[in-house]
Amino acid sequence: MLGISDDDMAVRPADSSVSGRGNGCGSDHGSRAHSLSGKGWESRGQKGNAARSFTFRELATATRNFREVNLIGEGGFGMVFKGRLESGQIVAIKQLNLNGLQGNQEFIVEVLMLSLLHHPNLVTLIGYCTDGDQRLLVYEFMSMGSLEDHLFDIEPDKEPLSWSTRIKIAVGAARGLEYLHCKANPPVIYRDLKSANILLDENFNPKLSDFGLAKLGPVGDNTHVSTRVMGTYGYCAPEYAMSGKLTLKSDIYSFGVVMLELITGRKAIDSTQKQGEQNLVAWSRPFLKDKRKFVQLVDPLLQGRFPLRSLHHAVAITAMCLQEHAHFRPLISDIVVALEYLACQSHKESPRSVARSPSSSSPLQCNSGSFS
Ligand SMILES: Nc1ncnc2c1ncn2[C@@H]1O[C@H](COP(=O)(O)OP(=O)(O)OP(=O)(O)O)[C@@H](O)[C@H]1O
Ligand SMILES: [Mg+2]
């Protein structure tokens, strides 16, 4: 049976200990009724391309019986296979491990969320299968895989992501998050932002994936939703990890961790590093505090090929996102503006300007937090 618990979709009562009202995106979300309709929640059904139901046989045929050569990845949810539908469309098919309630709930939330939310920076759900006990999700195929595949453990013969591509990915991921926080009504807290969940198309356009942990955000005077702490260690905001109080600012912290991964080429958590360097945020703190040390953060694979001014702004944005106090973290809409500015600059500047010092400031001023 398809069932869903309160914990996965319900919005809990407010606790005024977390400051800030609404989502701060300049909309009237707070005063609206809590329903899955409204501007940001367009139904693709009306446009004739709703997620459709597949039979298990159709998906077995598409993946040639889930052959090992078609296996493209595996995560907590299950295995992911490349497949070709009868129509000829290439897809990614995720097969849920048949191991209990949690996965089933994530499956339902994923189908619900992706049936209602549509944006160029969110992955498209083509369909699903609920034959018997089977639970499968069919997505558009993202030919470059995940951001994680391009940042870490790169083969020596593989070209690392350039600085401008990293900024492009940051902009796209921020736009996807902005859509969830500011355009969806009620807003959606993504809760699982990490480089493994940012998928890339052939032009390195990023799309957010995996909405099984997403929550509807607080509405009205509520400031947060209370949940069991879920998500991925290393990306989780400290206040959420400690209290389970989830706000839009929890996503901003995770976005800061992804920014740090883009800048450094280091994993959020890396147990192969020596003690003191395994947690990326903890390792980076001394560098984030001192402008003269920003360059020491940069991924050595870039071999100095990045504009210094762009680096300074990118690190400043990152540091703001990673502030311990959720209240001081910026809104995603401000981050989008600041990153879009950086993306324009990255095209204009020559990449070998490492020796120049930063002069102009980005739209997101660096006047709060631990750097000055
Ligand atoms: N739509 C897709 N197109 C192409 N490859 C995909 C797609 N979805 C997933 N993959 C591949 O499958 C891998 C596993 O994805 P999956 O979402 O199952 O796990 P994860 O994100 O690594 O971990 P977690 O289960 O914690 O979210 C991804 O890293 C990616 O390489
Ligand atoms: Mg994933």
Image (spheres, grey):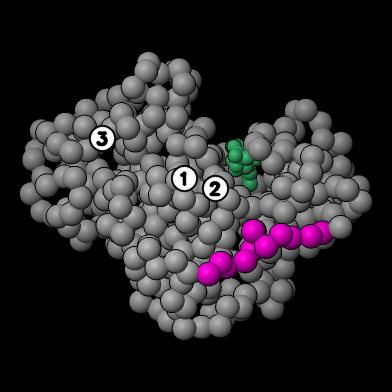
The reply to whether dot 1 and dot 2 touch (C-beta < 8 Å) is yes
Between 316 and 343, the one nearer to me in the picture: 316
Residue identified by numbered label 3:
285
| Amino acid type of the residue tagged 3 in the rendering | Arg
* Residue at image point 20% right, 50% down: 369
Graded by Cα atoms within 10 Å as few (under 14), some (14 to 19) or many (20 or more), the crowding at tag 1 reads: some
On the picture, is 145 further left or further right than 1? Answer: left
Disc 2 to disc 3, how far (Cα)?
24 Å
Return the mark for residue 241.
Answer: 1
Q: Main secondary structure of the magenta part?
A: loop
Residue identified by numbered label 2:
229
Disc 1 to disc 2, how far (Cα)?
6 Å
* Residue at image point 26% right, 45% down: 319
Magenta extent: 2-13
On the picture, is 283 further left or further right than 207? Answer: left
Q: Position of residue 63 (x, y in %)?
A: 81, 39
Question: Quick one: label 2 or label 3, which is nearer the N terminus?
Answer: 2
Q: Position of residue 295 (x, y in %)?
A: 20, 31
Q: Secondary structure at mark 3?
A: helix
| Amino acid type of the residue tagged 2 in the rendering | Val
Question: Quick one: label 3 or label 1, which is nearer the N terminus?
Answer: 1
| Residue 362 to residue 60: above or below | below
Which image quarter has ligand 2? top right
On the picture, is 194 further left or further right than 52? Answer: left
| Residue 307 to residue 295: above or below | below
Return the mark for residue 143.
Answer: none
Q: Secondary structure at mark 1?
A: helix
| Residue 342 to residue 259: above or below | below
* Residue at image point 46% right, 64% down: 224
Does residue 170 show up? no
Is residue 5 part of the magenta span, yes or no?
Answer: yes
Q: Position of residue 184 (x, y in %)?
A: 52, 71
